[in-house]
Amino acid sequence: MNSYSVELARMTAKRVDDEALARAKLHLLDWIGCASAGTAECGAVSFRSLNAAAGSGSCFTMYGNRRDENAAAFANGALGNLLEMDDTDRQGLVHPGDVVIPPVLACAETEGVGGREVLAAIVRGYEVMIRIARAVGLAHYGYWHNTATCGPFGAAAGVATILDLDPLKTAYALGHAGSLAGGLWQLRHEETVTKQLHTAHAARHGLTAARVAAAGGEGPLSILEGSQGFFAAMCPDGDVRAVCQDAEAPWRIFETTFKPWPSCRHCHVSIEAALALGERFVAERIARVSIRTFGDALKFCDRAEPENAGQARFSIQHSVAVALLRGEPRLADFEPDAISDPAIAALRRKVDLDFSGDCDQRYPAHMSATIEIEAQDGRIERCEIVDALGDPERPLDVEGLVNKAGTLMRRGRFSANAIDTVVDILGDDTIDFDLERLTGALCDGSAAS
């Protein structure tokens, strides 16, 4: 049967070149940093309890123990986005590393494969997840958390690579994964850990989907285009034909963004615009700050008075105030002491947000913002940023990613030996690596055990 899932499986079965494998290695490094820091966050408490109650197995978790592959994929899948520093595909509005990497690592340890196979699985998992996410349309994002809905597809594709499934069985895995997809944005309106549950759920379900297919269980091949399938049910302005377009294009992993700052990506163009003008003003003498940006940035990140770290990371006002007063935002700038800092709070109240039709037209292919700052003496200066630091047009270098991972691992209280080992394995330009050595260092070096 011809179907989009079969075609997608065939497309992504092509050889993964060394350049793409090297890029995947950087995403693995970045995810390890994000997830290791996540173990120390309050949002991980419930997931840590579940992990402690699970039985032992052969697959590492960031909590410093080993569990069966389903429990490990779930435990690690909950950790990557807690600090909002996870990688992202801006066009698909997804965070692939959170969902693809945990089940790939769990399955790889079960199957005993090497580092090169892990990296190929990451590349293919990102490809499937991003292609589907870019096709779902913005109406989908209005209600559905794209990482949760498109994530099971990517997780299944990555695990299918580890299991060496042929295109038909991979398509069956995608069919199972799509049938399990879900994740509503109502979580944004209350204080929850549901976003972390979304990524954990997607990681584990993608793994299960591939395992069922590997065992001979057929899945719906028309899950993407069928009359009761994913696009028909959940994507009113989506275009399923886009999923398999440009089959010969470079791997989509090269178009994925690394985040330099610990806040929602929708904030980052405003942060950078503020940084560009910050040195020209004395923060205490600023009369007003006006920011015009795209609609989703306002929908997700218009919070003038954040009450906790989670809200502060989704506040353009707070992020911009920090950038103007302190420079590049750090993890500590989103903690309670910074949120309650009188100078930051006063400047937050001077930040006005407004919708920009020009910025909205560029979105999601390009995120942008315009900032206008007026001093108390009447002087006005403006700056526009299109594409923030970390985007493909302005990538972070390897040294920056290594430093980011080290900072995050220290935040998670991982040992110096674990940090050195991770950097030694993943911070160079060699392709293959010893997976057992990597996961062993993470297990032994975790302070959460």
Image (cartoon, rainbow, N blue to C red):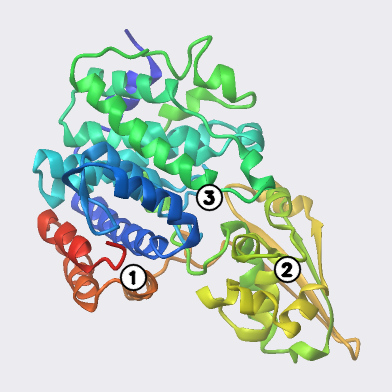
In this picture, residue 130 sits left or right of residue 440: right
Residue under pointer 1:
409
Label 3 sits on a secondary structure element that is loop
Please state which amino acid type lies under the numbered disc 1. Answer: Met
Which quadrant of the view contains residue 359? bottom right
Marks 1 & 3, CB-CB < 8 Å contact: no
Q: Do the residues labelled 1 and 2 touch (CB within 8 Å)?
A: no
Eye-nearest disc, 1 or 3: 1
Where is 166 relative to 296, above or below?
Answer: above
Question: Is 38 or 178 nearer to us in this picture?
Answer: 38
Which is more N-terminal, label 3 or label 2? 3
Residue 347 image label:
none
Please name the amino acid that badge 3 sits on. Arg
Question: What's the residue type where badge 2 is placed?
Answer: Gln
Q: Quadrant of residue 379?
A: bottom right
The circle drawn on residue 317 is 2
Task: Work out whether residue 365 or residue 409 is closer to the camera in this orientation and state it.
Answer: 409
| Mark closer to the observer (2, 3) | 2
Q: Going by the image, does 379 lie left or right of 167?
A: right
Q: Under tag 1, what secondary structure?
A: helix
SS for tag 2?
helix
- Between the C-alphas of marks 2 and 3, the distance is 21 Å
Q: List x then y, in percent, for residue 126.
A: 36, 42
The residue at the point 36 percent across, 20 percent down is: 176
Cα distance, mark 1 to mark 3? 25 Å
Residue at 37% over, 19% down: 175
Tell me the residue at 36%/36% (across/down).
Answer: 154
173 vs 161: above or below: above
Q: Is residue 193 left or right of residue 16?
A: right
